[in-house]
Image (spheres, rainbow, N blue to C red):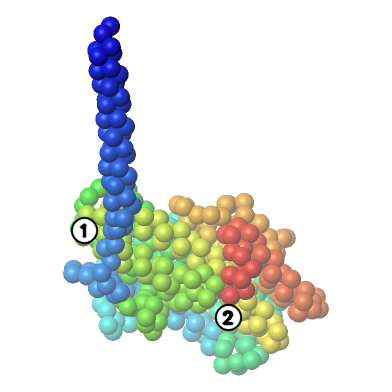
């Protein structure tokens, strides 16, 4: 080959190699610039308000059901006033089913609403409620003071005006009923409305209805947690365990973000917030059990065994609520049974709270608090609450 031809060929190859390198550099630059633009793109935030106040929002049915629950619990509590007030199972069942105009209508037309609490309870919770009504109907007829083995009314030693209708095993059914109502509301939020949101197509009208109903069952004002006045049921307990669980703001933000996302076709965001709420409400029930252990300790240290039966009964209601959650939950059925056995391993389904507190067994404060600690620690292990969170619940 001619020397000049060889030189031309070599130069041509060199220039093409430079062009290829420059092209590669340019391509990498373009790709990196695109990646950088993507990484800098803001994550969609749809909640533009600190209040649950949207056009066409409506959770009136949930407010009416909460009002029904209030009257049902108030009726049960009339049997606590003294040993001579009878509250029949039929009266409570009629209120549960909204049969025979059982309510005092004031702010809402409860009797004519077409709503019934019973229709919002999962099957297991409904069965439990009817059994509780039967027990209250029987125990409110005794007309005597409460003692181990004998149903009746007893008073808090620290506040004599606080009276408790106790079962023969020391269970305060008024509080168990109230906690079961909370379990039903949590079931509706997590297992019905938010679960339906996760499985729904793009029907924004339906999705908004789901979220409004779920928020209504939470029982808080539209500007929660800036305002914590008038809290009901789940909202009240969220606020009580907030110091340990830090749930007030996270729950409200999820409600706001999810609801606003629906109006902006942000279905992926809505579903992410639904999952946050489902998980948080499961943890809220568990945290409430720990909180009741702290209150039980305070009652025991004050020498108030009767009040301790009350707080233990509240915690028992929360433990039973765990089994109603048939959707996404942390705790297993076996662990729920393990938890119940810590109250009474001989009869976990109907624990003798007199034995737990040890009035007749002569248990020391330390021995009783070892039992409450075991319950709290098991919850902490299952739900991943650290020692600081457990202490602050």
Determine the residue positioned at 50% across, 77% down. 240
Does residue 175 sit above or below 82 in this rendering? above
Determine the residue positioned at 41% across, 67% down. 250
- State if disc 2 and disc 1 touch (CB < 8 Å): no
Q: Quadrant of the C terminus?
A: bottom right
In the rendered view, does 117 fall on the left or right side of 78?
Answer: left
Residue 301 % position (x, y): 70, 84
Q: Quadrant of the N terminus?
A: top left
Residue 150: which quarter of the image? bottom right
Does residue 12 sit above or below 284 in this rendering? above
Residue 304 % position (x, y): 67, 86
Q: Residue at label 2?
A: 165
Secondary structure beneath dot 2 equals strand
Q: Nearer the viewer, mark 1 or mark 2?
A: 1
Q: Residue at label 1?
A: 264
Residue 15 % position (x, y): 27, 26
Q: Earlier in the sequence, mark 1 or mark 2?
A: 2
């Amino acid at each position: 080959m001619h020397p000049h031809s060889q030189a031309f060929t070599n130069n041509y190859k060199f220039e093409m190699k430079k062009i290829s390198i420059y092209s590669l550099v340019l391509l990498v630059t373009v790709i990196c610039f695109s990646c950088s633009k993507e990484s800098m793109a803001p994550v969609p935030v749809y909640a533009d308000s600190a209040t649950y106040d949207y056009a066409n929002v409506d959770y009136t049915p949930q407010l009416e059901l909460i009002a029904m629950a209030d009257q049902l619990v108030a009726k049960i509590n009339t049997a606590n006033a003294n040993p001579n007030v009878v509250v029949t199972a039929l009266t409570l069942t009629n209120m549960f089913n909204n049969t025979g105009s059982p309510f005092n209508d004031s702010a809402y037309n409860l009797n004519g609403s077409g709503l019934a609490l019973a229709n919002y309870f999962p099957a297991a919770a409904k069965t439990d409620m009817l059994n509780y009504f039967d027990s209250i109907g029987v125990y409110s007829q005794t007309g005597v003071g409460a003692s181990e083995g004998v149903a009746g009314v007893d008073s808090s030693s620290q506040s004599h005006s606080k009276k408790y209708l106790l079962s023969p095993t020391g269970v305060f059914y008024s509080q168990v009923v109230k906690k079961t109502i909370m379990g039903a509301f949590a079931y509706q939020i997590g297992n019905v409305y938010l679960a339906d949101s996760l499985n729904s197509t793009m029907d924004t009208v339906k999705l908004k209805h789901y979220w409004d109903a779920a928020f209504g069952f939470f029982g808080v004002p539209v500007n929660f947690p800036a305002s914590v006045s008038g809290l009901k049921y789940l909202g009240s307990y969220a606020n009580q365990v907030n110091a340990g669980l830090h749930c007030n703001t996270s729950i409200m933000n999820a409600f706001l973000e999810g609801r606003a996302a629906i109006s902006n076709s942000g279905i992926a965001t809505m579903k992410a917030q639904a999952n946050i709420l489902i998980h948080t409400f499961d943890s809220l029930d568990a945290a409430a059990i720990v909180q009741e252990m702290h209150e039980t300790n305070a009652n025991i240290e004050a020498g108030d065994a009767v009040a301790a039966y009350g707080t233990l009964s509240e915690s028992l209601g929360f433990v039973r609520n765990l089994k109603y959650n048939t959707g996404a939950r942390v705790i297993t059925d076996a662990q729920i049974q393990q938890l119940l056995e810590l109250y009474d391993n001989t009869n976990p389904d109907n624990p003798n709270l007199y034995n737990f507190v040890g009035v007749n067994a002569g248990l020391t404060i330390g021995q009783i608090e070892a039992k409450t600690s075991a319950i709290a620690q098991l919850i902490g292990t299952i739900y991943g609450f650290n020692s600081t969170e457990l202490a602050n619940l």
